């Protein structure tokens, strides 16, 4: 997407829009009770009790035993899909990118964005959340959530914004993306058991939420928002789940 918002006036509007976005979360696109199309990110299930996203307490409990984690992300070719509600990048399984967590290997399947963030940290919402969706050989799911703060321009996000088709559809870029650059040398996480954040909100998902926050500029965040719209699900009840920090 080649849209640029360089003038001081546009940048002021960007910051104002982001402030509103972060204060109210995201607006729902419809309400089935009033005859409109239901929002695909809003919870409609009262039977499920381990749902995502949640408001993660900053002082999360230390794990009873140390978690074993090893990341092995590699450069991956760009396979960008501009979907109705998100920007998604599919990953070739032959890339063998992924993560080992507590003795289980999870291969990166795809990653996509939410504007604003779905998870909150101590009540604070971030402008963007990136989800790295992984699957094990037994089809178990682990999602790494990366909350992106407003600040310096992101080369990683800029490449995706530049190559994403403005209309719904897909495009294969002629360059690769290095996901490993999103993580600091020593990464720390919050972890808990939850669900997908889109219908049918299937539970049994292992969540790892990165405790550090890469940055993107206000202009980039607004360009992403224009592309995919507000697509964050409501925060769900934690109930009796343990949230660990390590």
Image (cartoon, helix red, strand yellow):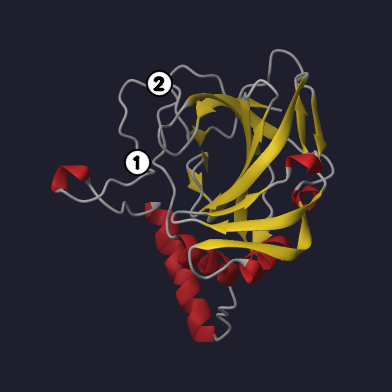
User: Is 122 displayed left or right of 139 in the figure?
Assistant: left
Kindly tell me whether residue 154 is visible in this rendering: no
51 sits to left or right of 37: right
Q: Is residue 220 left or right of residue 195?
A: right
Dividing the picture into quadrants, the one containing residue 200 is top left
Residue, x 74% and y 51% (percent of image)? Answer: 182
Residue shown at 73% from the left, 45% from the top: 92
Which structural element holds mark 1?
A: loop
Q: Position of residue 107 (x, y in %)?
A: 73, 34
Left or right for 52, reference 244? left
Tell me the residue at 40%/28% (across/down).
237
Residue 232, image x, y percentages: 44, 48
Residue named by callout 1? 42
Q: Nearer the viewer, residue 138 or 141?
A: 138
- From the top left corner, tell me how far across and down residue 145 is, in percent: 61, 41
Say whether residue 168 is visible: yes
Crowdedness near tag 2: few (<14), some (14–19) or many (≥20) residues, C-alpha within 10 Å? some
Q: Name the residue rendered at 63%, 30% in the picture.
A: 142
**Quadrant housing residue 159:** bottom right
In the image, farthest residue toward the top: 64
- Tell me the quarter of the image containing the C terminus: top right
How many marks do you count on the picture?
2
In the image, is residue 30 above or below residue 2?
above
Instruction: Calculate the distance from the C-alpha at mark 1 to the C-alpha at mark 2.
Output: 15 Å
Secondary structure under tag 2 reads loop
Instruction: Specify the label residue 49 is tagged with.
Output: 2
């Amino acid at each position: 997407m080649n849209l640029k918002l360089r003038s001081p006036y546009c940048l002021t509007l960007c910051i104002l829009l982001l402030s509103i976005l972060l204060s109210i979360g995201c607006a729902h696109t419809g309400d089935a009770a009033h005859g409109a199309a239901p929002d695909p990110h809003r919870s409609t299930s009262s039977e499920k009790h381990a749902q995502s996203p949640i408001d993660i307490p900053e002082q999360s409990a230390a794990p009873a035993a140390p978690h074993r984690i090893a990341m092995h992300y590699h450069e991956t070719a760009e396979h960008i899909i501009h979907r109705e509600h998100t920007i998604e990048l599919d990953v070739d399984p032959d890339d063998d990118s992924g993560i080992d967590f507590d003795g289980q290997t999870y291969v990166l399947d795809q990653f996509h964005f939410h504007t604003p963030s779905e998870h909150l940290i101590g009540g604070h919402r971030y402008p963007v959340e990136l989800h790295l969706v992984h699957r094990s050989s037994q089809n178990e799911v682990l999602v790494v959530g990366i909350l992106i703060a407003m600040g310096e321009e992101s080369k990683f996000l800029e490449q995706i914004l530049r190559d994403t088709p403005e209309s719904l559809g897909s495009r294969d870029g002629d360059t690769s993306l290095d996901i490993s650059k999103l993580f600091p040398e020593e990464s720390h996480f919050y972890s808990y058991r939850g669900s997908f954040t889109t219908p049918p909100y299937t539970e049994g998902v292992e969540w790892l939420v990165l405790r550090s926050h890469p940055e993107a500029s206000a202009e980039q965040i607004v360009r992403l928002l224009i592309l995919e719209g507000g697509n964050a699900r409501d925060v769900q009840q934690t109930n009796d789940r343990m949230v660990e920090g390590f």
